Image (tube, rainbow, N blue to C red):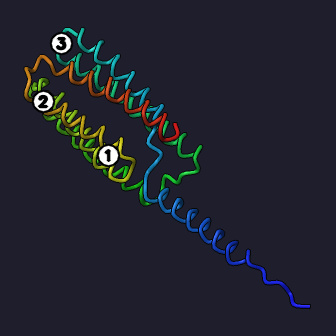
Amino acid sequence: MPVPERRDAPESLGRRAAEDLKFIRNAMARTATFTAVPGAGGAVMGVVGLVAAIVASRQPTPDRWLGVWLIAAAMAFSAGVVAIVIKAQRHGLALDAPTSRNFSIGLVAPLAAGAAITYALWTIGAHAAMPAVWLLLYGTGVLVGGVFSVLIVRVTGGLFMLLGFLAIATPPGLGNLWLGVGFGALQLIGGLWIARKHGG
C-alpha cells in the first residue's frame, strides 16, 4: 500500500523560514535604531522648560536670568538621562551598543560646545546671544543623534534649529520667548508624541 505524500511539509518549512526572517529583520531594526529616546521623560523636560521660561522672564538681572536657565538645564538633563535608563531597561535595550554610543556622541558634543560658548558669552556680557546659541546647538545635537533614532527625533531637532534662527532674526528681547517655545512647548509635544508612538 503506497504511503501518501505529505504536502504540508514544504509549506510548513516556508512559513517557518518567513517567521525567522521577520524575527531577524526586527532584531536588526532594533539594533540599528536607538529607540530608548524618552517620551515621558521628554515631556517632563518640556514642563521644566515652560516653568523656566516663566521664572526667567521675571528676573531683574541678566545673570539671574542665566542662573534660572542653567538650573533648568541641569534638571532637564538629569530627567532625560534617568528616563533613558528606565526605558532601556524596560524594553531590554543595551545602552552600550554602537547605536546608543553614536546617538550619545551626536547629542552630547554640541551640548558641550554650547556650554563652552555660553561661558564665553557670559564673560563679555552677551546674554542676548545665548537663546539662539542654545536652540541651535541643542537642535543640532538632537538632529545628529536622531540619525540613529526615529524620525520624530530628527524633526524635533530641525524645529529647534528653526527656532534658533528665529531668535537671531528677531529682537533680542524675544529670546526668552523662543526658549519657552523650544525647550518648553516643543519639547513637551515631542515627548508626548514619542510616548504615544514609540513605547513610552
Q: Which residue is mark 1?
A: 107
In three-dimensional space, the C-alpha distance between marks 3 and 2, rounded to whole angstroms, equals: 15 Å
Q: Tag 3, which secondary structure?
A: loop
Q: Does 18 sit left or right of 171 as displayed? A: right
Contact flag, marks 1 and 3 (Cβ < 8 Å): no
Which circle's residue, 3 or 2, is located before the other in the chain? 3
Name the residue furthest front: 1
Q: Amino acid at mark 3?
A: Thr
Q: Using residue 69 as the reference point, say whether residue 80 is left or right of it.
A: right
Query: Which residue sits furthest bottom?
Result: 1
Distance (Cα) linking label 1 and label 2: 25 Å
Label 3: few (<14), some (14–19) or many (≥20) C-alpha neighbours in 10 Å: few
The vertical placement of 1 against 45, above or below, is below
Which residue is label 3 attached to?
A: 61
| Residue at 51% from the left image edge and 42% from the top image edge | 85
Q: Circle 1 — which element?
A: helix
What residue is pinned by disc 2? Answer: 123
Q: How busy is the neighbourhood of tag 1: few (under 14 within 10 Å), some, or many (20 plus)?
A: many
Q: Which quarter of the figure is the N terminus placed in?
A: bottom right
Question: Which mark sits nearer the N-terminus, 1 or 2?
Answer: 1
Label located before the other in sequence (1 or 3): 3
Under mark 1, the amino acid is Leu
The residue lying toward the viewer, choosing from 18 and 62, is: 18
Tag 2, which secondary structure? helix
Task: Please state which amino acid type lies under the numbered disc 2.
Answer: Thr
Instruction: Provide residue 28's location: percent of width, then percent of height.
Output: 49, 62
Q: Is residue 1 above or below residue 15?
A: below
Residue at x 74% of width, y 78% of height:
7
Nearer the camera: disc 3 or disc 2: 3
Q: Position of residue 131 (x, y in %)?
A: 18, 27
Q: Position of residue 193 (x, y in %)?
A: 42, 33
Query: In the image shown, does 52 or 18 lie closer to the viewer?
Result: 18
